[in-house]
Amino acid sequence: MIYDAFVSCSYSDRWRGIELVRLMEGKGYHVCYHEKDFIGGQSIAVNIVEAVTFSKRVVCLLTSNFLKSTYCMFEFQTSLHRNIELKRKRLIVLLDESVEVDEDVLPKDVYNFLTTHTYIELSSNKWTHQLFYSLPLNPIQTKVSQEIRNSVIATDDVSLITF
């Protein structure tokens, strides 16, 4: 793995995403965030798949804006697929107050995930504690992870999900 976590959030919520990245990086985690880590010239879909594949966790900032974003929903679905593929719980959902867990409102896969997995409510004053409890115990060292990323990108042995 190259990253401890990939932060997925809508562009409309980018200020919250940036604050979340700063909070996590302040605790020593190596975080993938689209504005700083997606490779220019590469398709967005490939950038998303690589971010999910090479991250120990995916943290989705689930807001009403997230639900309206095609890219965010693709990040969620890719993360969910990766959970199933690896048989591991790698997807962490931070649920905003703007989202109601309602079967009639949410996309089916989001509703099913929220009703079968524990999520973190941002309205709770313990959400940061819950987040850090859910992240890997030993953060990846940034220098080592960049060397791994460069060697992975330089090889053709990486298999990605094709569309």
Image: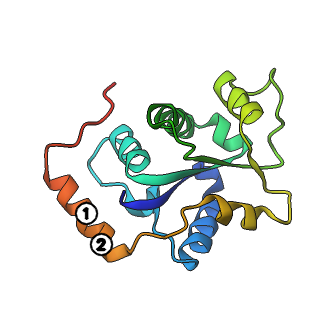
The quadrant in which residue 100 appears is top right
Give above or below for 42 relative to 85. below
Residue 144's disc is 2
* Residue 147 position within the rendered picture, expressed as x and y whole percent measured from the top left: 24, 68
Which is nearer the eye, 140 or 58? 140
The three-letter code of the residue at mark 1 reads Ile
**Could one spot residue 71 in this view of the protein?**
no
Check whether the beta carbons of the residues at disc 1 and disc 2 lie within 8 A of each other: yes
> Which residue is labeled 1 in the image?
148
The three-letter code of the residue at mark 2 reads Val
Residue 103's disc is none
- Callout 1: SS: helix
Give above or below for 130 relative to 51. below
Which is nearer the eye, 16 or 156? 156
Q: Which residue is drawn at 48% across and 70% down?
A: 139
Q: Which residue is drawn at 74% across and 46% down?
A: 119
**Could one spot residue 116 in this view of the protein?**
yes
- Callout 2: SS: helix
Q: How crowded is mark 2: few (under 14 residues within 10 Å), some or many (20 or more)?
A: few
* Residue 75 position within the rendered picture, expressed as x and y whole percent measured from the top left: 51, 40
